[in-house]
Image (cartoon, coloured by chain):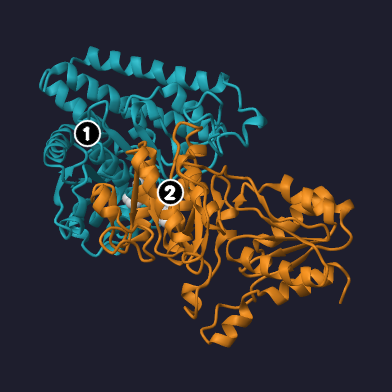
Chain colours: A cyan, B orange
Amino acid sequence: MERAHLVHLYTQMLLIRRFEERTAEMYALGKIGGFCHLCIGEEAVAVGAVDALRPDDYVFSAYRDHGHCLARGSDPKRVMAELFGRVTGLCKGKGGSMHLVDAERRFMGGYAIVGGHLPLAAGVAFAVKYRGGDQVVLCFFGEGAVPSGACHETLNLAALWGLPVLFLCENNRYGMGTPVERAVALYSDVAQNAAAYGIEAGRVDGMDVLAVRDAVGKAVEQVRTRQRPYFLEAVTYRFLGHSMADPAHGHYRTKAEVDEAKKRDPVLLLRTRMLSERLATEADIKRIEQEVAQIVREAVEFADASPVPPVTALEEDVYTS
Amino acid sequence: MKATYREALNQALREEMRRDDRVFLIGEDVAYYQGAFKVSKGFLEEFGSRRVVDTPITELGFTGLAIGAAMAGLRPVVEVMTFNFAILAMDQIVNNAAKIRYMSGGQLSVPIVIRGPGSAAHQLAAQHSQSLEAWFCHVPGLKVVAPATPHDAKGLIKSAIRDENPVIFIEAQLLYPMQGEIGDGDYTIPLGVAEVKRPGTDVTLIAYSKMLLVALEAAEKLAQEGIQAEVVDPRTLRPLDLTTLAASAKKTGKVVVVEEGWPFAGLGAQIAESLYRQVFDYLDGPIVRVTGRDAPMPYARDLEDAAIPDADQVVAAAHQVLYRT
Ligand SMILES: Cc1ncc(C[n+]2csc(CCOP(=O)(O)OP(=O)(O)O)c2C)c(N)n1
Ligand SMILES: [Mg+2]
């Protein structure tokens, strides 16, 4: 991979990391409310996967969607403004953290009913096929969605009709406090759930952005050329709590387990690699850190300075007239 | 031209599919079987399996898929074999179809029609006989249509398909064979417009879907006693054409609302409340509701008959608002 490309991936991952850290601070200050799910620890999946797409491909996400949206190139200012509930937000403050949408970038949204967006992704793929297009739909979801009826109905339809969807399961081991082995019968190889429908399936180390980029790149190519779905399990880990309401560990996992996982911090892994392979210098790393800090600072300033939506907006956008 | 309700729908869907390649029909047994109630007769031959799509029995899955297709710019018409099964797709309808436009701040829209028969047929028992329109009407973001005549069915389904919003289009199994006069060719009837089906001066009977026929029968009986009932069909239940309903209520000062569904939190309660707000001072007395009975639908024929409003009950309700008991 070219040096510039690596630097880009690193910058994206660092942006998500710093953005999420500032989001946590803003939440603590009461600038952001409601349910807010951070993706710290899972940046490599978002960045590596979205990097493999074309601009005219589509992306769907669940409620842990800040990273996916930023990776897709959405303006961090408008993402932060959405979290702040401001009129300048991507969705004019009506969606919030869990429902980011950036239609221009074909980021089709974050959805907060577990499993509920999988059929939507298949539907966009159905439309692509109907029109004879060659776009791919990338659909992120947690391993917690895998046992849902929505997931299984969608896998069956996608396989039955040869729909161009890449199902990307972010297996971060937990659905809130329930570990995968207590939720998914085929927990040791989650992708087997898709294999049962004749869907080609694979697994990748979700902490290694280059591995994700490579696996998703191949999967996307296959989906595009063969017009068949693909199911990829990315093995990752969430370093923080399920949401801002949940401490980093808690009763369902130990601090030791979290600390162990953090040894494979995806951002640090790439940084170490770039430095050791002399693809970046300490000065480069520092410069990127500063660039990112600047972007995040400006995002917060923009959000904070933005007006709240007028109350007259409340009943707008319910219907298209 | 004469046509049955079924034929009217068939014609309208066919014409819409001819004029717009984005329109496609998807649902269980819509293609080879030609629809559980034969609404899509001849479609597979004319449009092929690309546009007439048989699905497995997965309401959540194919309704959600169609919503996604609508988000990407197609105009899906989802046939639910009956609305009883739409309950399995309720999350997709309520949390996705109805809200995606709003949650996205207007960036995305969901131009979808979800259609099929609702309410009771004959002796289908509790799980296959129920009126769920109040569930859908409750949800901002959805439009709900329930035509009673072949003419209305044709004009309204066309408007529903051309509408940019998700539309729940409730037909009725017992209406499919009903004949009526329909307009020629490509006509539409706007959503949200009620119609006076029979003019009168003494009492207003508000009824939709199958209950319109019951109300018209009651009006005929009342006429024999010299009572001129005005029968108004909202046709679209959300948005409700309060202007037309209120004008009739104002004129007669006496209102009966007829619905087949359950009484508690039923649509008639909403219609009455809306009318009270607008025309309370013009009413001679309380609005009377005629509804289905407050029980799951029984199988036994005599019990089923007793559970569903009939013309005599509507006549009795009219007597009540006219203080003629
Ligand atoms: C249908 C449904 N049931 C329950 C919830 C509450 N809930 C929100 S997130 C979550 C856990 C989901 O875990 P997973 O899919 O693995 O995603 P992760 O949070 O790990 O990213 C639950 C139970 C929900 N949002 N939707
Ligand atoms: Mg999880």
The answer to whether residue B69 is visible is yes
Task: Give above or below for B175 relative to B161.
Answer: below
Q: Which residue shows up at 22% across the image and 43% down it?
A: A166
Check chain identity for marks 2 and 1: say if they share one: no
Question: Which chain is home to disc 1?
Answer: A
Residue under circle 2? Answer: B12
Give whichever of A153, A23 is nearer the camera. A153
Q: Secondary structure at mark 2?
A: helix
Q: Mark 1 — residue?
A: A133
Name the image quarter holding residue A52.
top left
Q: Is residue A246 visible?
A: no
The image position of residue B179, as x and y in percent, is 51, 63
Front of the two marks 2 and 1: 2
Q: Which amino acid type corresponds to the residue marked 1 in the rendered image?
A: Gly
Q: Quadrant of residue A139?
A: top left
Q: Position of residue B170 (x, y in %)?
A: 51, 58
Q: Is residue A52 left or right of residue B299?
A: left
Q: Which quarter of the figure is the C terminus of chain B placed in?
A: bottom right
Image point 15% across, 52% down: which residue? A199
Percent from the top left, x then y, of residue B178? 51, 65
Q: Give the class, few, some or many, for how many residues have Cα within 10 Å of label 1's Cα (few <14, many ≥20).
A: few
Chain label for disc 2:
B
What is the residue that sits farthest to the front in this orientation? B1
- The numbered mark at residue B132 is none
Q: Horizontal and vertical percent for residue A223?
A: 16, 40
* Type of the residue with mark 2: Ala
